[in-house]
Image (cartoon, helix red, strand yellow):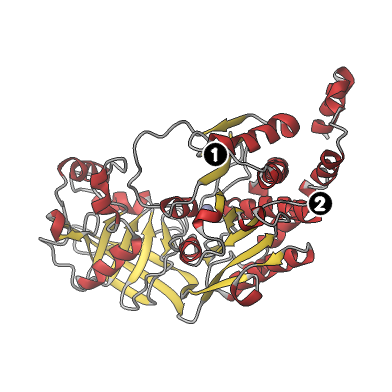
Amino acid sequence: MKKLSLLLLILAIFPDMLSFPQDDSESKILKNFHSISSEEMMTWMEKLCSAEFNGRLTGTPEFVASATWVAGKLNEWGIKPAGDNGSYFQWFDHPYTVINDIGSLTLHITQIDGSVIDKSYNYPDDFYPGMNSGTGEITSEVVFAGYGITAPELNYDDYKNIDVKGKIVLVNRDAPYTDPRNPEYRKWVGYCYHQYKLENAVRHGAKGFLYIDGASANPNISYDPSIIVCGIGPTPLADIFAGLKISNKELTERMIKTLKPASFNTGKTLTIKANTTRHPEGKGCNVIGIIEGADPVLKKEVIIIGGHLDAVGKAGKVVNGALDNASGVVDIMGAAKAMAQSAIPLKRTVMFLFIGGEENGLLGSKLYVEKPVFTEEKTVTFINLDMVGNGNGLYVSAGSTYKGLLTYFERANANYIHRPFSSAAPVPGEFYGRPRSDGVIFSQNGYRTMSISTTDSYKKIYYHLPGDDPEAVTIEIMEDVAKMIYIGLIGMANDQVINY
Ligand SMILES: [Zn+2]
């Protein structure tokens, strides 16, 4: 209401602001522009975050149900399928693990008199059940295994002077080499993955795996029934290092500085319990819809707007993934519906790509670039939306690389939306780090890639945590993002020549 009365006031003072061009196509564009509504977008947001979809973990029947729902909407709006065999879906195998209950993490503290006191930790602040854990229980000494890396070619082995057979390993995230802007980093990237670290721990005979990656949901596809996995937060980590004269932070800093392993037996004993069920039969998919271009030549070119549909599922409490990334999905849906129902013919083809398997290793985007519907050469750009619905401002990255593409969104905002707008500053040098978004997969495969974000977030962000619910997004800016996409994509699709 506040926003509306402010607008009326501004219009009273500056009536010229209402003077939209009277051109017929512009009025058609604006008719559907105004049909994009935050109320309707909120109903989609609530649907995607409902119990029916149970956190949209890729592979689960609930994820497939959410994909089917999105495809149903595309169909309802007259957007054509562009997936496998005339369907909306591009399928891939995707085993998954269901967390049946949160399990537990307990420290056993031996007193001077030999008696033992147990300290149990709390979910979710202190520990988070491993989303790739085997089922069962392990009680053992904890061995700090640095980054869990064995890299003979780099003369680096965290397992060199320790014996972890039958024990619990405690492992840092990433690698001791920390400069992703240096080509040297490329040699370490393969060792940064959770999958690798777990497999390497299993190879060395470990039976438990404590991951120092914050206590949050961390799905990935690696799995071995013989190892019990758990993420840990700051309190149990401090307890493991208690009395050792050095903290994990100090030790980690030393490893980064020296590039030398610093593994050791902590002398602390813990129990990890996990209760999981593995589903090797899981299937994941991308959902692909297109509005075909009407120009006989330009229709062979495509503009892709995409975002990941999956979230991190339910490990204990459900993580609904409202901001991450129902927000991106709903932004795209808002623009898609308005474009499909607009009477404006598009010259180029526009694709709406809802990606699966992002949270588990960017699997859906990797599949798409392997089996693209349009070749990379015929793709004008891939625009990624991930966590786009919390804040006041709009941000478009790659804007400095593809200034010409940026202008479509810049103009849409300047003419119709009027939000604070920023774009990426030039990035010096190359990035050799581990890809962490679908956009990077497209970019590495030669696609002109952009991403849209919201800035100045003012609601709390529950990243991969319970609480990432519809209340955690700012739906007003999502309406504006959908409007910016709608105007921007119509311009991009219809300009005879695009100056990148
Ligand atoms: Zn995300």
Disc 2 under 8 Å from ligand 1? The reply is no
At numbered mark 1, what does the secondary structure look like: helix, strand or loop?
Answer: loop
Q: Which quadrant of the structure image shows residue 148?
A: bottom left
Q: Which quadrant of the structure image shows residue 469?
A: bottom right
Q: Is residue 146 found left or right of 413 in the rendered image?
A: left
| Any part of residue 367 in sight | yes
Gap between marks 1 and 2, in whole Å? 26 Å
Disc 1 under 8 Å from ligand 1? The reply is no
Against 408, is 311 above or below? below
Against 134, is 496 above or below? above
Q: Residue furthest top?
A: 13
Q: Which quadrant of the structure image shows residue 220?
A: bottom left
Other residues around mark 1 within 10 Å, as few (<14) / some (14–19) / many (≥20): few
Q: Position of residue 252 (x, y in %)?
A: 23, 45
Q: Position of residue 429 (x, y in %)?
A: 34, 36
Of 344 and 96, which appears nearest the observer? 344
Q: Is residue 177 found left or right of 155 in the rendered image?
A: right
Q: Which residue is mark 2?
A: 342
Looking at the rendered structure, the kind of residue marked 1 is: Tyr
Against 258, is 297 above or below? below
Residue 500's label in the rendered image is 1
